[in-house]
């Protein structure tokens, strides 16, 4: 017998059920029409849709990386997405390449690639501001930024860790700050899918 009151609780979401996530909204998928989508990118991260339907962006040089994928009105996707209604962002992608550093003789030499590049998927609001970001390596089974194509199921809690507003999302993308002097990026990002799932 309990001598003190027992308090109950209700499980609202169980993201550890072991079941594979089920897509609810597919924002982008390789091979599907992209007329309803738009791309915005900074000079150091020019983005485009490939002939095979994938999204590609090359990160060259030391400048800031910023790529935003948005959807047009009437695309079938709500103008503003409330991500708190979903358990995961599912992303199929890879990030090839690495960093080059300037040597005393002036040559740019490739450096060994770190396992965790601290590169993430970013949510954007209507003003193009970050509404949260999740490091890809944190969602990978091996704890590394994927160099080969892999499907990551990113728990929504990774985006809300810093108490971000994920209820007014109008774009998905990628942001990376400027490199330190003497270093340059030489990366190729290929994205096959971005979806919201439960």
Image: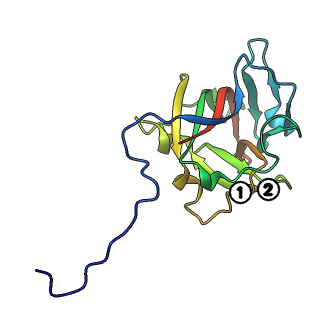
Give the camera-side residue of 149 and 61. Answer: 149
Mark 1: few/some/many CA within 10 Å (<14, 14-19, 20+): many
* Picture residue at 25% right of the left edge, 79% below the top: 6
Which quadrant would residue 172 be assigned to in this image?
A: top right
- The single residue placed furthest to the top in the displayed view is 51
Q: Circle 1 — which element?
A: strand
Mark 2 residue crowding within 10 angstroms, few (<14) / some (14–19) / many (20+): few
Q: Which residue is mark 1?
A: 131
Q: Nearer the viewer, residue 112 or 163?
A: 163
Question: Measured from the top left, where is residue 127 in percent x and y?
Answer: 86, 56
Tell me if I can see residue 134 in this picture: yes
The x and y percentages for residue 11 are: 41, 60
Q: CA distance from mark 1 to mark 2?
A: 6 Å
The color scheme shown is rainbow
Q: Position of residue 132 (x, y in %)?
A: 66, 55
Q: Is residue 117 visible in this depiction of the protein?
A: no
Question: Residue at 86% across / 36% down in the picture?
Answer: 43
Numbered label tally:
2
Quarter where residue 48 is shown: top right
The disc at residue 129 is 2
Comparing 157 with 7, the one in front is 7
Q: Is residue 148 left or right of residue 170?
A: left
Q: Which corner quadrant holds the N terminus?
A: bottom left
């Amino acid at each position: 017998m309990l001598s003190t009151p027992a308090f109950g609780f209700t499980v609202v979401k169980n993201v550890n059920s072991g079941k594979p996530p089920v897509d609810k909204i597919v924002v982008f998928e390789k091979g599907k029409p992209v007329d309803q989508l738009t791309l915005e990118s900074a000079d150091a991260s020019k983005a485009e849709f490939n002939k095979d339907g994938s999204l590609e962006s090359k990160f060259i040089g030391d400048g800031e990386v910023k790529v935003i994928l948005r959807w047009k009105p009437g695309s079938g996707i709500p103008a503003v997405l409330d991500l708190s209604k979903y358990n995961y962002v599912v992303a199929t992608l890879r990030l090839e390449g690495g960093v080059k550093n300037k040597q005393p003789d002036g040559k740019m030499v490739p450096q060994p690639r770190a396992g965790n590049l601290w590169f993430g998927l970013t949510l954007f609001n209507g003003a193009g501001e970050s509404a949260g970001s999740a490091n890809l390596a944190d969602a990978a089974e091996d704890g590394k930024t994927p160099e080969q194509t892999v499907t990551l199921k990113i728990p929504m809690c990774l985006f809300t860790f810093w108490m971000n507003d994920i209820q007014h999302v109008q774009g998905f993308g990628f942001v990376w700050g400027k490199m330190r002097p003497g270093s340059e990026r030489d990366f190729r990002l290929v994205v096959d899918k971005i979806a919201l799932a439960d």
